[in-house]
Amino acid sequence: MSGSVFYKMSQMETEYTVGDALFSKKEIDDRTRELAGQIVRDVRGEELLVVGILSGAVFFLTDLVRCLPRELDVKIDFMSVSSYGDATTSSGTVRILKDLGSDIAGRNVLVVEDIIDTGLTLSYLLKILKARHPKSLRTCVLLDKSARRETAVDVDYCGFNAPDVFVVGYGLDCGGRYRHLPDIHVVNL
Ligand code: IMP
């Protein structure tokens, strides 16, 4: 994919290009099926509430839940948090913009996130959700940039380890752009 785009980062205009695919949709689909298999084994036939973090995780969540068997009692809910604003580095500030529509006390909750980077967003969310006394609380992330972790977070299901690069596509954005790309691409800043 070619053509550079100007991206407003803080007060500066930064030029970037979207590079080749790092993970293809086919690779993502294959790995998603494997993760769904692990989740099914762990949940042992009990109800599962899948919580997606808007907006990035929507693509991954919808593909993941469609790999779960119809016999499983699967419910879906969403939360929205702000962590990045318009920059490509973490602000460290996490705010809940949209809370869950359902009570999670006594339920098996699976939080689905697109990417874990510093870990600040997920650790903050898990702290909030734990305080609501779910029966179990697990995490499933598509990409893990473990080299950039600033706080320890338990990730139960991980799609891929990702290098320390900014990526877009398959729900991941840069300034709101490129979520619609089927593959995941590296951004050349
Ligand atoms: P963390 O709090 O630093 O772990 O960041 C988690 C959030 O940052 C994710 O939910 C994404 O919204 C965003 N993020 C981190 N890295 C990337 C990236 O490479 N591309 C797009 N969004 C990212």
Image (spheres, grey):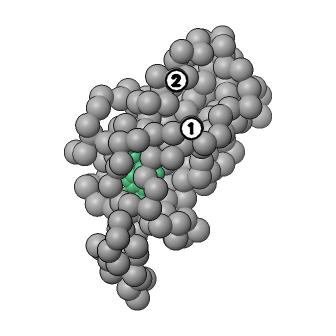
Quarter of the image containing the C terminus? bottom left
The residue shown at (60%, 48%) is: 54
| 62 to 135, vertically: above or below | below
Report the disc number at residue 128.
2
Q: Position of residue 170 (x, y in %)?
A: 53, 61
Residue 120, located in which quarter of the rendered image? top left
Q: Can the viewer see residue 54?
A: yes
Report the disc number at residue 121.
none
Among the two numbered marks 2 and 1 on one chain, the one whose residue lies closer to the N terminus:
1
Q: Residues within 10 Å of mark 1 (few under 14, many from 20)?
A: few
Q: Nearer the viewer, residue 156 or 166?
A: 166
Report which residue position mark 1 lands on: 96
Left or right: 99 as drawn, with respect to 184? right
Q: Nearer the viewer, residue 108 or 5?
A: 5
Type of amino acid at the residue the image marks with label 2: Ile
Q: Nearer the viewer, residue 10 or 82?
A: 10
Type of amino acid at the residue the image marks with label 1: Ile
